[in-house]
Image: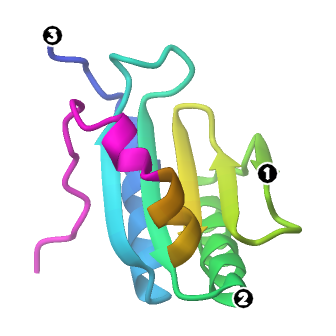
Amino acid sequence: MTNFQIQPEALQIAKIAAQAADEKQATDITVLNVGEVLAITDLFVVASAGNKRQVRTICDAITDAVRTQAGRSPLSSEGVSQQQWILIDYGSVVVHVFDDDTRRFYEIERLYSDVPLVSWRLVS
């Protein structure tokens, strides 16, 4: 693989989304640099929640944080009514929030096991 350059705005959105998920007690938060293997987006933010209600709460927090801090609204969202796997599409960043069982079933990180991870935690 070559070194795919992540656009600063994409990195900002991904970090805001991951931090917002963390603040709502999402677990196993991962940011994947998929830009070299997918033409449609640069980064995936993947997070888990213990139940369907928490999936929705995390997604609402992410949407609010990205709108407030980066001035961006999602291009689209999917899975909102089922609340097992909600996808929030920001173009260069796609956020996936799963309930625990659905994440174990799809194993999205296994599908992209060869892509680099991106650090998202703020250094204190």
Residue position marked by numbered label 2 in the rendering: 53
Crowding near pointer 3: few (<14 within 10 Å), some, many (20+)?
few
**Which amino acid does the dot numbered 1 rest on?**
Glu
**Extreme front residue here?**
105
Q: Position of residue 109 (x, y in %)?
A: 35, 47
Indicate left or right for 24 with 55 as reference.
left
The reply to whether residue 111 is in sight is yes
Tag 2's secondary structure? Answer: helix
As displayed, is residue 58 above or below residue 24? above
**Which amino acid does the dot numbered 3 rest on?**
Thr
Residue position marked by numbered label 3 in the rendering: 2
Of label 1 and label 2, which has the lower sequence position? 2
Residue position marked by numbered label 1 in the rendering: 78
Task: Give the quarter of the figure containing the N terminus.
Answer: top left
Which quarter of the figure has residue 9?
Answer: top left
Is residue 112 in the magenta section? yes
Q: Residue at x 25, y 21 (%)?
A: 5
- The colour style of the image is rainbow
